Image (cartoon, rainbow, N blue to C red):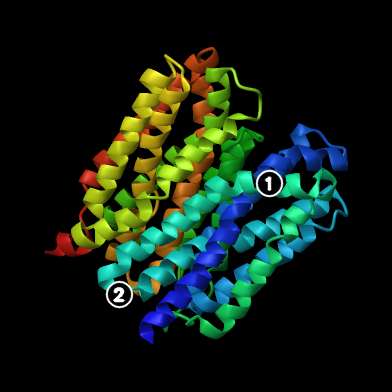
Amino acid sequence: MQKKRFYAIMAIYLLGLVVGGLYVGMVAPVRTVIQADFGIGNEMGIWIITIYALFYAAFIPIIAKAADRMGRKPIFLGCMAVFCAGAVVCSLRGSYLVLLLGRVLQAVGACGIIPLANAEIGASAPPEKRGFALGITAAASGLSNVLGAGIGSAIIGAVGQENWPVLFYACLPFGLLAIAAGSFLLPKGAPKQSAGEVDLPGSVTVVVFVFAALLGIQGVYPVPAFVCAGVSLVLFLLFERRAADPVIAPHFLRSRSLLLIFGISLLVGAMINSMALIPEFAEAALGLETGSGGVYMVVIGVFSMFGPPLGGKLIDRFGPKYVLMAGLAVATAGYLILALVAARFPSPAAIIVGLAVMGLGLGFSMGAPVNYMIFENADLAEINSALGAATLVRQLGVSAAPVIYVAFIRTGVGSAGYLPMFLVAAVSSGLAVLLSAGYRSRKEEKG
């Protein structure tokens, strides 16, 4: 019975992960369609994507902290409800501002799904199968992110561009199913028994810091944005030292192991976002028609989906450190193939081989090992916050990477411009290997 209950819990959270993950990329292929419908240009239209990324990152620590205080079940169900409400608002077709409001609601709902799913599945799984369970979670999240753009294009192709609102309310049956099933089957999770007052000053300043930092990274009024981010970070650190129940516990930043994990998460986030530029690289390298390079993303999707479950089983046997190092080393090799072979001597075969190796390595290193390390170093009462912090840091890497990559791409012409970009990604992966080599769990450090 206990085993059946665990599988039911896992299925509900995985459903939420897939629904939330698909909408990371589903909207991108129809952005221009939506722009045309509202009569706006690219400068305004890009906010369909940007505003989601900003609010998604900014509210991760708040939602994770709320789960520590109230339990995972009510927060997860609430996040799913907010996400579905956002989808309804997006589909109203009232005005562009209404659409952006819907995207904000979707982002706030989605940002609680990934860390809470990892926390519940990791905590509910038998210890000897935790790695495998977290691997399945990583596979579901990663694959839905990769396939989102393709599924979005397929839906619009089936219903017609004029019916783009269908893209948003297509998630409602699945979201409502997750809410209904979760209401009956999910355990509440153990909230903190001695939680102090809500850390409102810390909550506000961390949201302002993340929001301003991401605006600056994306080049939106960079000087005032970074000044605002710096001021709010200082205020946040001051507030957290005095808070009875801080949003991000200060001892997270005093733990050598957790700091290493956060550093690895930042670098892995930067690596993940290199995938967003693969279609453009394929088009530039092979002279393909604009918009057709996305087919090469299938290579990454196919090879990356094997890594998380297999890596999870290896984690259960050998621990997360060496699995993570091996995955990162394979990803490094994939980036080097892309840089030194595919970018210099472009051919479909070279690109496919490089993407296959890179995808396999990322599949092993994207989620399960880092999340397992969090379980090894954080108390269960704070596991939501710890996973939320790692997710936030990874999202910062995801957001910062395109600015760096594009700057390097501009140094060359055609496929040659992507050579330094892939080398930068290889360096990021190599640094993550070095950080992983220095990792020791809390138990090992005390022993």
Residue 188 coordinates in the image, percent (x, y): 49, 82
Q: Mark number for residue 154?
A: 1
Report the amino acid beneath label 2.
Answer: Pro
Query: Which residue appears at 42% of the width and 55% of the height?
Result: 390
Q: Secondary structure at mark 1?
A: helix
Tell me: 420 left or right of 30.
left
Question: Between residues 347 and 99, which one lies in front from this camera angle?
Answer: 347
- Mark 2 or mark 1: name the one nearer the start of the chain: 2
Q: Name the residue tied to disc 2.
A: 126
Q: Is residue 357 above or below residue 124?
A: above
Q: Residue furthest left?
A: 447
Report the amino acid beneath label 1.
Answer: Ala
Tell me: 419 left or right of 38.
left
Distance CA(mark 2)–CA(mark 1)? 39 Å
Q: Is residue 291 above or below residue 254?
A: above
Inspect this view and state whether residue 182 appears. Answer: yes
Tell me: 64 left or right of 102.
left
